[in-house]
Amino acid sequence: MPSPSRAAVSQWEADLEAWQDDPTSAPDPYEEPRPTVTLKAVRLQIAEEEAIERRNGSLPPHEVSPGVFLQVGLDLEEQQRALQAMKAKMSTGENSRAAVQEKRNTLQHCILLWQAMQGIHMPITALLRNLPDLPNGPTLRSSPTLPAVSTTSPSLPSLPTLAEDIPLLLPSAIPSELRLAHLSPSLLDKALKLRLAQADDALDDIRRYRRIITGVREFTRLNISGTGQRTTGRARSVYSAFQDKINHAAERYRAARHALLSLDPQGEWQTRFKDLQREDIRGPGRPDDNNQTGDGRYEISWIWLVPRVSGDIADGCQDLDPTELLNNMRHEWATSKARADRWREEVELLEEEMGRILEFFEWKARWWRDQTGRRVPKCHTLASGLAAYAEKQASVFEGLAVRCATLWLPHLRARPGYSLPTWSTRYAEYATSEVIEDTTALLVMGEETTSESSGDESDST
């Protein structure tokens, strides 16, 4: 993935300043750009292409077009994955098993109707389905020797008991030799376009659900943590529901990518659609590692840097627009810049707190010296003792100030490009190892008299 240029960063900074000046009219740089090409757009394009094919007389004689046939097949494949996930989470109750069986019956009926259309658009599947060793995987491992293929609709074979395990035999599941020999190029082209759009939509769903989960986690941390088991349980249920959606979208993406490897193994789409691992599903922002990774040191997952297909769907992978990729990176850049700005604010606040601590110690030392003349005892020995005690306490607080300054100044001086705060000039002479040793001893003496000074302070006033 290319890194943003100086010109791109300058433009992003200008956009950020424009949004800060007028958030109502300027585009929000923190909002990730929404996809411009979706599965719906691909379906529209396929429908327009089939309208031209119908006028040319190249469509098969069936009321259901190849594009619609493939779309229904992808929907059935999605329903099979959903039913498998539902079965995996099914409880032992009779209601749950009844719900799964009802969905299974409905899905099996839909598959039967769809297979009747499949005999028209993909006649080879009727013979493949009758093979005794037909696997349930997405692709046949070998190319069996087949008899002559008939164009008539064959009788439907007996189906497996479980509808979610029925091989649909979509174009990507047919061996390449049989696919090229028995399926039309137009059908294969439509299948490729639909799989590309399916992968794009699945990645977009993963990103959208990840943003929601990040928001839920942050809201829970700030508003719910520690407020009770019932409230925390509800937040955990919401989190679990969206995590299931992420897993489902990830399975859909993997299925689409597996199909693309079969339909177009050398295609340019591989520059965008990488193999999705479990650890890739993270973000936005730093990884979920209990804040062990710093804001500026985590690596952005590739799923946030994938550009959408633009222009012609079939050829959209050949030329990746760098501008589109940079627009995807702008969201992460704006978020990272906001974190860096907040970090600089924290540094400024910390320096201000350091200065105020030193000012308090200096004020406290002056306060103790001012207490010397508040009492005028008749006994000279008592007056001398009170003055000595006040001076001792003043020296303790001065030592605390010097001790803090000598500990802080080396770290402040080690920062490249940062100017020292104004209070550092008053303690520059103390930033030596000898002074640090001396002030350490003075600090120990001050700690021994802390409890004593807290009680005597009220007496001296």
Image (tube, grey):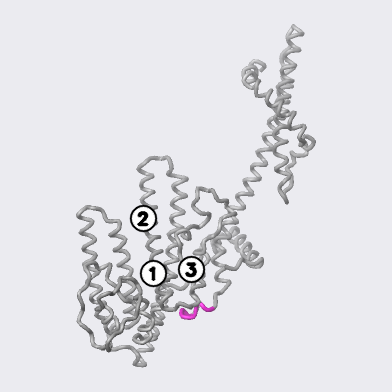
Estimate the x, y position of residue 457 in percent, counting from the top left.
65, 19
Lateral position of residue 220 relative to residue 373, left or right = left
User: Which disc number belongs to residue 199?
Assistant: none
Mark 3 burial class by Cα count in 10 Å: few <14, some 14-19, many 20+: few
Q: What type is the residue that disc 3 sits on? A: Lys
Q: Amino acid at mark 2?
A: Ala
**250 left or right, relative to 391:** left
**The C terminus is located in which quarter?**
top right
- Name the N-terminal-most of marks 3 and 2: 2
**Residue under numbered circle 2:** 241
Front residue of 375 and 95: 95
Q: Which residue is mark 1?
A: 255
Q: Are circles 3 and 2 on residues that touch, CB within 8 Å?
A: no
In the orientation shown, which residue stands out farthest toward the top? 379
Highlighted range, magenta: 312-318
Q: Quadrant of residue 19?
A: bottom right
Question: The residue under label 1 is which amino acid type?
Answer: Ala
Q: Report the residue marked by disc 3.
A: 274
Q: Is residue 65 above or below residue 78?
A: below
Mark 2 or 1, nearer chain start: 2
